[in-house]
Image (cartoon, helix red, strand yellow):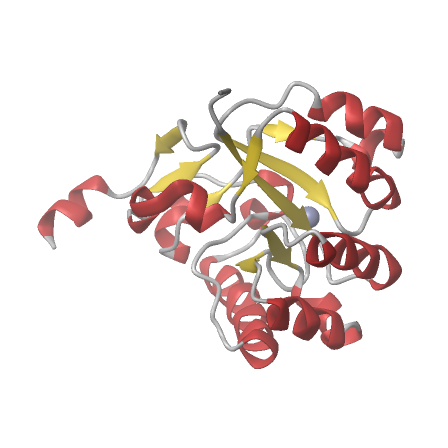
Amino acid sequence: MMSKKEIALTFDDGPWGETTSRILDELIARKIPATFMIWGEHVLQYPELLEKAAKSGLFAFGNHTFHHLSLLDLTAEEIKEELELTDRLVKKYTGIVPAFVRPPFGDADAEILKIIHRPIICWSLDTRSWEHHDATLVLQEIQSAQDGDIVLMHDFQEADANALPAVLDFLEAENFVFKTVPDLLGEQLDDEAYIYYSQNRRDKVGFENEKGKK
Ligand SMILES: [Zn+2]
């Protein structure tokens, strides 16, 4: 028997209308867990999609900030506000406060980690839909998937929504088991002093000294 591999699909920038709706329908019909990185402003437009996602019980939710600006350009106060506004909205429609953050554009450093005090989730595989807008190329990127990958997709992007059925078929045929990010990372996620890229790769960029003192 072929051994099982694990993978976490993550969808950024939603909830966003028709594309999020199609992605949710596909995942829910096939009972496939995934993680949505929520853009706060968009929840104001599509709260019912976030509510629907939460009701399925299949998904985890990360904070992708309120305005989707690079955190490197913001003050500590602005960063906290970006997260708090989104926390409040996600709590309102899912009942939970996101336990981790995906920074817009993946922009993060040690300073930002200190400010947000939550693990930062980046990715090890990017479908690059935001660049090529082509469902065929999304599937091509997915074909390099490895055990433990965190995959960056966008429920904001037509190409990812269009490719999703084929992406899921391919990964299932390759013996991948789908996990949410917290399930994929397990206990290591309890340590907020890291930026996580996959099950096997994380960078310690945070406040070791402060952690040690606690
Ligand atoms: Zn984004």
Q: Residue furthest toward the bottom?
A: 92
| 185 with respect to 10 (left or right) | left
Q: Position of residue 65 (x, y in %)?
A: 60, 59
State the count of labels: 0
Asked if residue 110 shows in the view, the reply is no
Q: Position of residue 93 (x, y in %)?
A: 61, 78
Q: Nearer the viewer, residue 140 or 189?
A: 140
If the image is split into quadrants, where does the C terminus sit? Answer: bottom left
Which image quadrant is residue 24 in?
Answer: bottom right
Residue at 55% x, 45% y is 72
Which image quadrant is residue 43 in? bottom right
The residue lying furthest to the left in this view is 213
Horizontal side of residue 2 vs 64, given as left or right: left
Q: Residue at x 56, y 54 (%)?
A: 74
Task: Give how far across and how far down residue 179 sits, in percent.
Answer: 52, 45
Above or below, 76 relative to 94: above
Residue that sits furthest to the front in the current view? 1
The residue closer to the viewer here, 109 or 29, is 29
Position in image of residue 154 (x %, y %) = 74, 46
**Residue 86 shown left or right of residue 42 in the figure:** left
Q: Give the residue displayed 62% in from the left and 73% down from the top.
A: 55
The vertical placement of 27 against 122, above or below, is below
Q: Is residue 101 visible?
A: yes
Residue drawn at (39%, 31%) of the image: 202
